[in-house]
Image (cartoon, helix red, strand yellow):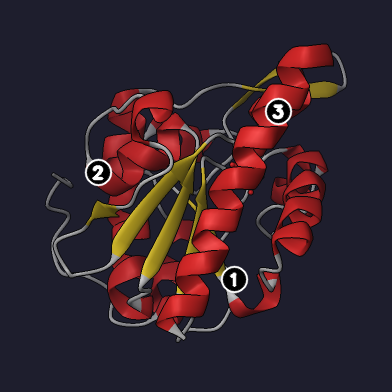
Amino acid sequence: GALDMGERPETLDAIDKAIHACARCPIGELHNTAVMGEGPQDAVLMIVGEQPGDQEDLQGRPFVGPAGQLLDVHLAQAGIDRGAAYVTNTVKHFKYVQRGKRRLHQNPSAKEIDVCRWWVESERMIVQPKLVLAMGASAARGMLGKTVSISKVRGAPIPLEDGSELWVTAHPSYLLRLDGAGREEQERLFRADLAAVAARLTELA
Ligand code: URA
């Protein structure tokens, strides 16, 4: 489970303030800025990524870079209104290594996820979404506290202890790294996962 970090913040604003001051892991000590989730506090759907990327770090918003643009295309195709969803990340700071002028993404460690997931759990407790879409292994670990195989758990909901449903899919950045037939196949699976979530949203509406 999530590490006990003391009293939970009671508002999204309090989380926003606290993550900007967070130094519970070394990622927060890089040259970066915490990125808070965004969207309606009463959203039915919460979409969870891994961590902000370069663009998200610069703009201070989740999923505004290349992965976010691909996500937007797929959400629109599935008929899911991004503006009605609460969009956030498991890890609040961008983890990178500097290579010349570029900052290259680094995967967060399991330990870093397990420390940081306390924040996304706090967001989930406030928003209380009925559906959670976790994209990628880090987001799935952030929601479950353990590592799962995406190919094994995708396509069916995982019940969470508060009665909501967790749906796990691949991360859009993973799609961006593929090409050819592999890309097509993974896009198809991603589309199918979003269609299933869209259908559940309609049922729950
Ligand atoms: N990838 C993520 O996981 N989250 C973002 O916000 C952007 C890229």
> Which x, y percent locates residue 83?
68, 76
Say few, some or many: other residues with alpha carbon within 10 Å of mark 1 (under 14 / 14 to 19 / 20 or more). some
Q: Give residue 175's mark.
A: 3
Q: Is 95 placed above or below 91 here?
A: above
> Relative to the observer, which residue lies in front, 59 or 135?
135
Say few, some or many: other residues with alpha carbon within 10 Å of mark 3 (under 14 / 14 to 19 / 20 or more). some
> What residue does disc 2 label?
144
Q: Name which residue type carries label 1.
A: Glu
Q: Secondary structure at mark 2?
A: helix
Give the image quarter of residue 38: bottom right
The answer to whether any part of residue 99 appears in the image is: no
> Where the N terminus falls, by quadrant?
top left
Q: Secondary structure at mark 1?
A: loop
> What residue does disc 1 label?
38
**Sequence-first disc among 1 and 2:** 1
Q: Name which residue type carries label 3.
A: Leu
Q: Are marks 3 and 1 in contact (CB under 8 Å)?
A: no
> Which x, y percent locates residue 22?
40, 52
Say few, some or many: other residues with alpha carbon within 10 Å of mark 2 (under 14 / 14 to 19 / 20 or more). some
Q: Name which residue type carries label 2.
A: Leu
- Asked if residue 162 lies left or right of residue 200, the reply is left
Residue at 38% over, 78% down: 127
Ligand 1 rendered quadrant? top right
Q: Are marks 3 and 2 in contact (CB under 8 Å)?
A: no
- Mark 3 vs mark 1, foreground winner is 3
- Asked if residue 106 lies left or right of residue 44, the reply is right
